[in-house]
């Protein structure tokens, strides 16, 4: 009988960790830090939330980042390996017809006032008109770096949805992106194997307003700040460059969903093989090792899509 633990990292993550020099460290940390269950404090955390970010693949196999809302306890944790989420309230884009039992999703919960965040990767075990039930595959916490504190109130206009779609950023889109202090990226890795680290994932990217730059009408650039060294997102993008970016305009109550193709630019200071894009805002370092380049494929604008606003 093979009692070896399931691998913590897939080949994309391992490749990025090797290039970044964190592979040995992550080999030791992964099995200890990434669990197949939620500790009680994580279960309590998810049940206390009034919103949760979700990454999934829709019926056309497109990776999407979305956001689900509710009053505290709209997420329930019956056991340490289960979450039940009421999916009735979203940006207006999430419908259960887009998902099916057996799909793998990524979840990200954030308390913006405390900067606390936890993540879950899970598989859907049940769907009905109101809820989805999830079995936990991976559960882990994230540090509070680059989360800008916010205090929310109810958006009275929420639900008066309208949506527009295009292939090019307009000036309003550019204003939202240029002023954003965060975005949420959904990525996906699937090589047909059934290990826990396959499927959709969603993570937070943050910094000072302006940390996302627009370098051409269809190209976004983001310096990769120092983080936990896991490289979940970059590992996915290395294997599958198509991703989904969600920008939330918390002031207006609107949201912007951008489908992109991704490229990871590595900077070698010794050989000077690339132009180093430095951003000293919130990085803790004067030099950037990597930059993410996103080529815009599709833009979806969601009006009055956020149930809460600042």
Image: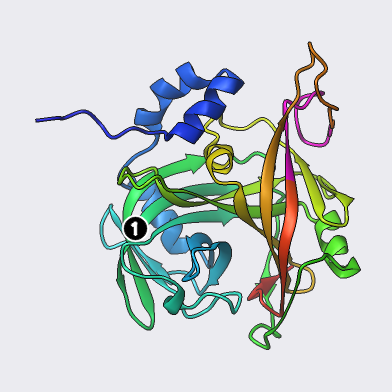
Circle 1 residue = 123
Q: Nearer the viewer, residue 307 or 65?
A: 65
- At 33% from the left edge and 52% from the top edge, which residue is drawn? 136
- 286 is within the stretch colored magenta: yes
Secondary structure that dominates the magenta span? loop
Q: Quadrant of residue 168?
A: bottom right
Q: Nearer the viewer, residue 104 or 84?
A: 104
- 290 is within the stretch colored magenta: yes
Residue 257 image point, x, y percent: 68, 65
In the displayed structure image, the side of residue 150 where residue 204 appears, left or right = left
In the displayed structure image, the side of residue 143 where residue 199 appears, left or right = left
Residue 137 image point, x, y percent: 33, 48
Whether 114 is drawn above or below 306: the answer is above
Q: Is residue 112 visible?
A: no
Q: Residue furthest bottom?
A: 160
Q: Secondary structure at mark 1?
A: strand
Residue 238 image point, x, y percent: 57, 38
Q: Residues within 10 Å of mark 1 (few under 14, many from 20)?
A: many
Q: Quadrant of residue 110?
A: bottom right
**Quadrant, the N terminus:** top left
- At 77% from the left edge and 24% from the top edge, which residue is drawn? 285
What segment carries the magenta color? 279-293
In the displayed structure image, the side of residue 289 where residue 24 appears, left or right = left
Q: Quadrant of residue 277?
A: top right
Q: Is residue 305 visible?
A: yes
Q: Residue furthest top?
A: 270
- At 33% from the left edge and 80% from the top edge, which residue is drawn? 128
Q: Nearer the viewer, residue 294 or 212?
A: 294
- At 21% from the left edge and 28% from the top edge, which residue is drawn? 4
Residue 276 image point, x, y percent: 84, 27
Whether 243 is drawn above or below 89: the answer is above
**Quadrant, the C terminus:** bottom right
């Amino acid at each position: 009988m093979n009692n070896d633990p399931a691998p913590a990292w897939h080949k994309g993550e391992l490749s990025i960790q090797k290039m970044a020099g964190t592979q040995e460290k992550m080999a030791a940390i992964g099995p200890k830090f990434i669990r197949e269950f939620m500790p009680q404090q994580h279960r309590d955390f998810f049940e206390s939330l009034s919103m949760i970010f979700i990454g999934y693949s829709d019926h056309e196999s497109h990776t999407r980042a979305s956001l689900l809302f509710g009053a505290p306890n709209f997420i329930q944790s019956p056991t340490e390996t289960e979450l039940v989420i009421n999916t009735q309230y979203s940006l207006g884009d999430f419908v259960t017809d887009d998902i099916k039992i057996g799909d793998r999703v990524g979840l990200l919960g954030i308390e913006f006032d405390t900067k606390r965040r936890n993540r879950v990767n899970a598989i859907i075990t049940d769907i009905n008109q109101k809820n989805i039930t999830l079995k936990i595959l991976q559960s882990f916490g994230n540090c509070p770096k680059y989360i800008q504190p916010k205090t929310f109130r109810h958006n009275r206009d929420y639900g008066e949805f309208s949506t527009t779609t295009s292939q090019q950023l307009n000036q309003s889109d550019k204003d939202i992106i240029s002023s954003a202090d965060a975005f949420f990226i959904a990525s996906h890795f699937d090589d047909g194997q059934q290990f826990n680290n396959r499927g959709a994932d969603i993570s937070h990217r943050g910094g000072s307003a302006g940390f996302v730059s627009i370098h051409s009408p269809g190209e976004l650039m983001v310096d990769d700040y120092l983080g936990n060294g896991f490289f979940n997102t970059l590992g996915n993008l290395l294997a599958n460059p198509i991703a989904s970016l969600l920008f939330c305009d918390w002031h207006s109550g609107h949201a912007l969903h951008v489908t992109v193709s991704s490229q990871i630019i590595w900077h070698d200071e010794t050989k000077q093989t690339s132009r180093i894009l430095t951003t000293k805002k919130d990085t803790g370092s004067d030099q950037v090792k990597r930059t993410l380049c996103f080529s815009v494929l599709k833009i979806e604008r969601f009006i009055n899509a956020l149930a809460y606003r600042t």
